[in-house]
Amino acid sequence: MDTVLLPGSLYQVKFLFDNLTIKPQSILVIGGGNEVIAVKVSNHYNTNVTLIVDEYELFINARLIIGNNKNVSVILMSYETTDFTSSYFDLVYAQASISLTNRNKIVREIVRILKPKGYLCVGELINLKDDVPKFMKDIYEASNLLPLPKNEAEKYYIQRGFKVLKYQDLSYTLEEYYTAFLNKLKKEKEKLEEEKAYYKKLFKRISHESNAYLKLGGDKYLGFYALLLEKEEI
């Protein structure tokens, strides 16, 4: 139950626990693969957590992982247009789940559903250099990714009404993540052949990312930052 196959692994949630000492009561976790994180957040802050995913297959998988845990609710919902009322959550947590081409719309929705003085803990894929080679751009396009420029990550969120409380460079976790993913892919190759098309596509996409990062020098261009942000009062 402690395996987290995401950039940032368990380091981002540790970053959250180390730096957010208050106890938020209403918590949203965004993104498939965050099931273990959602349980840990629920246990740490001793409150219920809502986890949203935006694909049916991810919803079924998340329900299986969460099992009978009554403290974590899994909901199938678009990240851009949720059903939550405005100013609903004390804390929103997103780990490698909103570094996408539609980030602006997702962040706009996060701002809407966060209470004033509410917190956002976000893990973002980062361009470490301004000059990104074509093979990395091709990976981003195939994966629908839009990493933030290294020197603009904090500025991006400040412009959207957040105050940066803490940030941490977790780029060193990417090698661990991509290595673990390729190992999992090798072990489950036969099983994967029998899986639904969605999972085949997912594994193929991330295997391309992994190979680019580990074998083609992607580590020089792709990083991962965790930020703890507070929504400014208007």
Image (cartoon, rainbow, N blue to C red):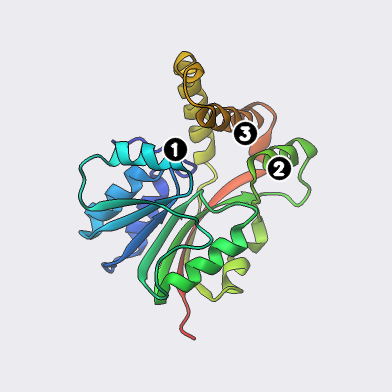
- On screen, 83 above or below 4? below
Considering only order in the chain, which callout, 1 or 2, is on the residue closer to the N terminus?
Answer: 1
Considering only order in the chain, which callout, 3 or 2, is on the residue closer to the N terminus?
Answer: 2
Q: Residue furthest top?
A: 190
Return the x and y of residue 96 as percentages of the image width and height. Answer: 51, 48
Q: Which mark is residue 226?
A: none
| Quadrant of the rendering where the N terminus is positioned | top left
Amino acid on which the number 1 mark rests in the picture: Glu
Q: Residues within 10 Å of mark 2 (few under 14, many from 20)?
A: few
Q: Which mark is residue 141?
A: 2
Residue 185 in the figure: left or right of residue 28: right
Q: Which mark is residue 209?
A: 3
Q: Quadrant of residue 157?
A: bottom right
Q: Residues within 10 Å of mark 3 (few under 14, many from 20)?
A: many
Return the x and y of residue 168 as percentages of the image width and height. Answer: 49, 56
C-beta proximity under 8 Å, tags 2 and 1: no
Considering only order in the chain, which callout, 3 or 1, is on the residue closer to the N terminus?
Answer: 1
Answer whether residue 195 is visible to the viewer in this image. Answer: yes
Which residue shows up at 24% across the image and 60% down it?
A: 45
Amino acid on which the number 2 mark rests in the picture: Glu
Between 88 and 174, the one lying in front of the other is 88
Between 119 and 70, the one lying in front of the other is 70
Answer whether residue 164 is visible to the viewer in this image. Answer: no
Q: CA distance from mark 2 to mark 1?
A: 22 Å
Which residue shows up at 58% across the image and 52% down it?
A: 99
Q: How many marks?
A: 3
Would you name the residue on which mark 1 appears? Answer: 57
Determine whether the residue tagged by mark 2 lies in a helix, strand or loop: helix
Return the x and y of residue 122 as percentages of the image width and height. Answer: 48, 58
Amino acid on which the number 3 mark rests in the picture: Glu
Determine whether the residue tagged by mark 3 lies in a helix, strand or loop: helix
